Amino acid sequence: MKSILVKDSGPSRTVRGSGASRIHRSLSRVSFAVHEREDSSGPTLETKVSGLIDDDRDSGDGVAASVEARFAALGPVEPAAVADLLRTARTTVGLEADGGSSADTARAADALLTLLASGPGTPLSLRAAAAREELQVFEGTLADGGADVKVVEAMAGELEAVAEAVADAGKLREALILGLHSLALRAEALGAMSPLLAPSFLRLCALMWALGRLPQAELLARHAAHEALKEYGLQHRLPGDALVACGDVLGLQGRFEEARAHLRLALELRVKLMGRSTAETADVYMRLGELHQQHGMYDEAARLTRQALSTRKKLLGPTHPHSIHAAEALADILLLNKQFASAEQACTLVLSLHCETNGGNTSTPRGVAGLARLAAVQAGDGRSREAEATLKRAITGANKLYGTEHPTTLGLNLEVARLLLDRHEGTEVAQRTAEQMLRSCVRSASRTAGGGLASARPTAAGTASGMLGAAGGTGMRSGPSTLSGMRVGTGTGLALAPGAATEDALVALHAEAQSLLAELVARKGRHEEAERMYTQALDAYTRLYGTQHEATVKCMCGLAGVQAQRRRCQAGEGLARRALAAAQALLGGEHPTTAACWTALADNLAAAGEAQEASGAYGEARRILLAARGPEDEEAQRAGRMAEALSGGTRSPPGRGASARDSGVEVSAVAS
């Protein structure tokens, strides 16, 4: 988990409370990694902050009042809603919903620490054992007559530190138990609704986010923001940290305008409090860039990311990991915006920085990610053979780092196979090589995942579209590319650590390899084999992502196309209609994936003899593809030919009318 918990920035400091001084640990920052994207609509960020640039320190009473008013306009949270949320969190980890005392959570925390301490002598087990001893001493102090606020704060802080380590080990529910006990201790010492609990609520927000409970995480972040403003005012960084967390969670829920409002206000607060050229301000610029990139607003995303990169280079130097990350993010945005020349320059710069910091060695996680990113640019620019050579360099590095059966290595091999499939001048040798690579990936993923292939867990969201598809150079593919991981937050690069080869990642790789292999064998006329592979891949995608996900939709589309070839038109038509409805809801009516669904539907209608309806569906596919890809696109040309050939046909009874094949026009599965 990439630093989802709030970390401490230094020694304790005294803050004002109700009556007496309270001690709490100051917050550094909430380091959340979000996937990246952009916008240029509405007032620009420069307009919002223009009055702040010349004087970074003294806002004046009028500006402060304005900020507080906008802060309040974002909407506070009712205490009853927070109480309901905490009851839900308690039931999540097996506690009684209404047992709100620290004694109740203490039993669960003690049992958990005992279990963690009983493991092998790892740093986590040793820390858990030490924390359990401290907790037992603390409980004894409480039994003897109580503990003062400083002692409570120290114990709560230690529990939160262990919770962070537990969360980093992937034990999120266990971390939530410790977080709830820490909150219960502070609540008993400070009061259940004390504003001084804001840091604890912010940490719980991080855990709920990591558990995929975004609405609950949003509520906790909003509550923390307003309570922090109430207790500490605008001259403390905690309100801004909470706004950043809230903006990130809103962005992940697709609520762009709300997310942007929160992040812009956080930026304004940080500029006023710390100055514009600070690492903290650059962090908000990065998050705003990521938000805009998520929504396809690449020009504004590039501007914001350049601002962050400039600040980080100035403060930290060009070879600092945070500076390199900003350069990587900028390269990704340029790639997505199809500015291939600029993107290649950025990728080359990033690779040179990696080489400089690693003694010329590119066999590092970030080096492998950099090569994959460069290959994406080359492929998007139509230089397939250069991209293939670059990917092979990345595979060499991944083999050294992770071995041949790690998801990163397998994903890179999938991308090479993808290039071979997409090569227009592809020979039988290239097709045979691609098939061998795909079958090897299927076997390796199946062998490594073991039973996970039959028990994939549903996830809140899958990965982004394929590396080459994202670049706009290869058309629609049936699954999410593993290389989408090269667009990451402030944590690692593309590559997963060897221990992070999760079952879900392997199941997704297995499904993607099957989808690509199904496409390949369908091209060779082996439609029964292709249908079997598509069916297996669709089952895995549905269990991983559900039906409302682009990877699932593309696989449905490919399967429907194969069913049209096999004259299983009733099943194929129903599947194509479901895929079309999902594509329109997810991607809109003008997306190439939506066009492919129209084509799959038309193939089935044509094979069933529904000439007029099929002609209309082909025409709709052609219209979308012409707008998206231009008149040279092969799929658009095929859809046009089919629509023209069927335009004079009439609706015929099933099984009796003239099909597309009767008209001399081939009905082919559409999976690319």
Image (cartoon, rainbow, N blue to C red):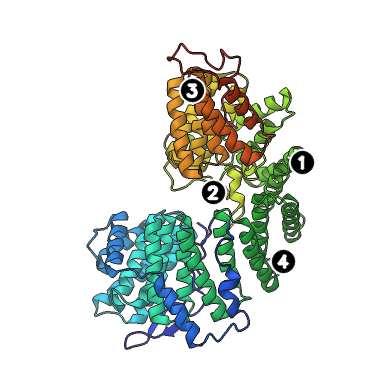
Instruction: Check residue 318 in the rendering and tell me which mark sits there, or answer none.
Output: 4
Residue 431 on image: x %, y %: 68, 26
From the image, tell me which residue sits under label 1.
Answer: 386
From the image, tell me which residue sits under label 2.
Answer: 499
Marks 2/1 in contact by CB < 8 Å: the verdict is no
Mark 4 is on which residue type? Pro
Q: Earlier in the sequence, mark 2 or mark 3?
A: 2
Tell me the distance, in whole angstroms, between the alpha carbons under discs 2 and 3. Answer: 48 Å
Mark 2 is on which residue type? Gly
Secondary structure at numbered mark 3? helix
For mark 2, does the 10 Å Cα neighbourhood hold few (<14), some (14 to 19), or many (20 or more) residues? few
Q: Earlier in the sequence, mark 1 or mark 4?
A: 4
Secondary structure at numbered mark 1? helix
Tell me the distance, in whole angstroms, between the alpha carbons under discs 2 and 4. Answer: 30 Å
Closer-to-camera residue (466/187) = 466
Residue found 39% across the figure and 55% down from its top: 213
Residue found 61% across the figure and 14% down from its top: 664
For mark 1, does the 10 Å Cα neighbourhood hold few (<14), some (14 to 19), or many (20 or more) residues? some
Tell me the distance, in whole angstroms, between the alpha carbons under discs 3 and 1. Answer: 41 Å
Closer-to-camera residue (642/185) = 642
Left/right of residue 628 with respect to residue 89 in the rendered view: right
Mark 1 is on which residue type? Glu
From the image, tell me which residue sits under label 3.
Answer: 605
Which one is in front in this view, the residue at disc 2 or the one at disc 1? Answer: 1
Secondary structure at numbered mark 4? loop
Mark 3 is on which residue type? Leu
Tell me the distance, in whole angstroms, between the alpha carbons under discs 3 and 4. Answer: 58 Å
Tell me the distance, in whole angstroms, between the alpha carbons under discs 1 and 4. Answer: 28 Å
Point out the residue furthest to the left here: 98
Residue 66 on image: x %, y %: 46, 80
